[in-house]
Image (cartoon, helix red, strand yellow):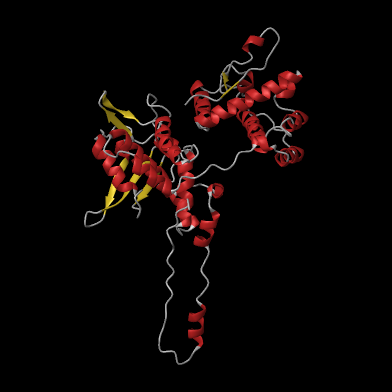
Amino acid sequence: MPPLVYPPVKTPGNLEKHHRKRPLFDTSSKLLTKSLSIPSYFLPTSDYDNILSALNNCYAASTQDTHSRALKHYHIFCDEREIPSHLRFPTHEVILLAYAASHFGSLSGGTARHRINALKTFHDVHNLPWHGSNRLTKILKGVAFNTPISSTRPPRAPITISMLKRLLDKLDLGTPLDAAVAACACTAFWGQCRLGELLPSSSSSSSSSIPKREHLTRSASKRGNLRSYELMLPSTKTNRQGQTVTILRQEHISNPLPLLQNHLAINNLPRSTTLFSYTSSSHHIPTPLSKRRFLARCNSIWSTFGYPRITGHSFRIGGTSQLLASGIPPDVVKTMGRWSSDAFLRYWRHMDKIAPAQTPHPPDPFNSIQSILPNTTHHFTTITLTPYHDLSK
């Protein structure tokens, strides 16, 4: 995993190096060296290496990248004001207030919070005192309250089962690429998967966190009927040790089980190959389906129906909303989607469909009357069936 990086402090005579990045855990860093020193004693080199490796692996590559950009922004802020180095790290409380307030009226509160959190992470790694205060909390709240409309964006639209149906109608499931696209789309939707958990960023990149053919196993009933697939994700955003996704049969054309079977039959993948790979006449080796190629194929079809361009996370959002609208309890949906917190509440869409499905139905007044009549000879039972909602309607 590449180390988190940050730009150096700009100094006279070194302006051309202002945009150069340096590793956060660089052993030549004076801040890091000082934070790991013990007076009159030196640990074995292997112990220091273990410390650095453990710190480095605390953060996902994507987190390291966004923190790096946030820290670079902080350094530019300091350079423009010629703030001396000793006030930058550890950051003086008033400098923190000024940096947070610099977002006021121009950027969102979320952006300001993220950049302050990245700065705090830098302090934590280097064991520097953090001078965050109640005033800083209030300033961040004020920035959030004054977020300009230009810095806000509407919630990402979810994929719906109608969109999946139209996608499947237009795909040629007898061709290798479309077979892989169909299987991936419905697996991501019903499995509430992040697209980055299933597909690499490009066909040429390789990642140990992307599942291979050998990570998919089937579960059949005693009669031999396919009941579900178990997909082992080697590593996820919230769990580096990996998690298992249970892919269940669905009473819909987007049922992922036969689509996965079709994909495996069409592409005939070796066990060590990336799961959603496809073969072509020009390549004897299966080509991994990339996020870019996948989304381009999906959007090329959906755009003909007037749908806006969708992003990878729309599948996870859509699957979560669909399961909730089908009446599955939120705690079950949360477990199935491998959510570690209530953050999944942010992904609920179409509350007009979810709320009725999750609201207990009141007792039938007729049954209530029957229960208090002493000579009633017939007993009635009310069975409530949860409708299968199409969220696009």
Quadrant assignment, res 172: top left
* Left or right: residue 45 compared with residue 105: left
Please state the horizontal and vertical placement of residue 361, each as a whole percent of the image. 51, 69
Can I make out residue 245 in this image? no
In this rendered view, identify the residue nearer to me: 63 or 103.
103
Quadrant assignment, res 180: top left
Query: Vertically, is 220 above or below 290?
Result: below
Can I make out residue 9 in this image? yes
Residue reaching furthest to the top: 13
Quadrant assignment, res 171: top left
Query: Vertically, is 353 above or below 6?
Result: below
At 47% from the left and 52% from the top, the residue drawn is 391
Count of marks overlaid on the render: 0
In this rendered view, identify the residue nearer to me: 135 or 168.
168
At 36% from the left and 36% from the top, the residue drawn is 211
Please state the horizontal and vertical placement of residue 344, each as a whole percent of the image. 53, 48
* Left or right: residue 312 compared with residue 117: left
In this rendered view, identify the residue nearer to me: 49 or 280.
280
In this rendered view, identify the residue nearer to me: 167 or 304.
304
Query: Vertically, is 90 above or below 326?
Result: above
At 46% from the left and 52% from the top, the residue drawn is 322
Residue reaching furthest to the bottom: 375
Please state the horizontal and vertical placement of residue 62, each as a whole percent of the image. 52, 31
Please state the horizontal and vertical placement of residue 230, each as a whole percent of the image. 34, 46
